[in-house]
Image: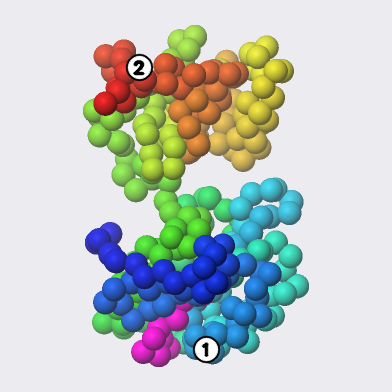
Amino acid sequence: MPSATIKLFLVHGDPKRLRTAELSNWTGKAVSGPRTEFDSVLAREESDKSGIYFLTGTDSETGKPAIYIGEAECVRDRVKNHNDKDFWNQVTFFVSKDENLTKAHIRYLEGQLLALAKTAGRAVVANTQGSGSKLPESDRGEMEVFLEKINQLLPVLGIDLLVPMAGSTTPDAPTSKLLYCEIKGLKATGFRSANGFLVQKGSEAVASERPSSEKWPWTRNLRQKLKDDGVLTANDDRLLFTRDIEFGSPSAAAAVIHGGHANGLTAWKDASGKPLKELEVV
């Protein structure tokens, strides 16, 4: 993405409350706020326009982040109909200041954003299906730019659920950045990412937990969650990562691979055997 200057306005001075966001040289505008300020968010004049909206929160059944992405010719009227959904605790919407977003435009954006959310795999997508829309080539080009700007602003507003996993857009990290975690003849590969540490598809992990997992049960619980989600699957006498997956830290990634508590700064090493702890010394 190109560099950008963001204008973030905190209506009440609190970054968790009602706020607006704009990008320099862009006709779009975002409005976001918690469910506790639902009326204030929808009382703004921007909500009377056509646009794209996001409802974000936590899925009650899985405990995972959840997101609903919708389009509306009048954001205020459409969003009011979602009060019966109890999962969401934040509403965010995007409109155009020059009022050039047509029904076809917002349907196109909705379809593209839903596809991004599903591909990212960071959240349960609450939509049953998206409408989508075909556009003339010139309009499609304009909406791709609008889409790019939305994706720049969403993480700033606390919504990173559409951000692709690091490594999912490119097959591999640069060879110089790859790290290896080995145990009992098994090997995992990964690298530092913006959100923590990414373990690559095809990496291996031990099949059973260490006794230390009784003392630190979060490791066992996380491994079970990854099994339930299909990220870790049994393969002979080991577990296999079926896709790229990000962890909050190198130690969390190493613990899953080792089946128990592990220090990621020493467990992860480069091709020459130098541990991450030494690689990151400034």
Asked whether 147 falls inside the magenta stretch, the response is no
Looking at the rendered structure, the number of numbered marks drawn on it comes to: 2
Residue under label 1: 45
- Residue 98's tag is none
Which comes sooner in the sequence, label 1 or label 2? 1
Q: Which residues are magenta?
A: 93-102
Q: Amino acid at mark 2?
A: Pro
Residue 60 coordinates in the image, percent (x, y): 73, 54
Separation of marks 1 and 2 at Cα, in angstroms: 55 Å
Question: Residue 170: horizontal and vertical position, in percent?
Answer: 31, 44
Comparing 183 with 238, the one in front is 183
Please, is residue 253 above or below residue 248 in the view? above
**Secondary structure mostly taken by the magenta-highlighted segment of the chain:** loop
Q: Which residue is mark 2?
A: 275
- Which residue is found at the position 25% from the left and 34% from the top? 174
| Residue 168 higher or lower than 129, as above or below | above
In the rendered image, the quadrant that contains the C terminus is top left
Circle 1 crowding by C-alpha within 10 Å: few under 14, some 14–19, many from 20 = few
Q: Nearer the viewer, residue 24 or 171?
A: 24
Q: Residue at 55% x, 72% y: name it.
A: 12
Rendered location of residue 45, percent (x, y):
52, 89
Q: How is the image coloured?
A: rainbow
Quarter occupied by residue 141? bottom left
Asked whether the viewer can see residue 165, the reply is yes
For this orientation, the residue located farthest to the top is 184
Query: Would residue 134 be seen by someone viewing this image from the given angle?
Result: no
**Image: 273 above or below 160:** above
Left or right: where 85 falls relative to 21: right
Q: Between 189 and 262, which is closer to the camera in this rendering?
A: 262
Name the residue at the front extreme. Answer: 13
At 46% from the left and 22% from the top, the residue drawn is 264
User: What's under tag 1, amino acid-wise?
Assistant: Glu
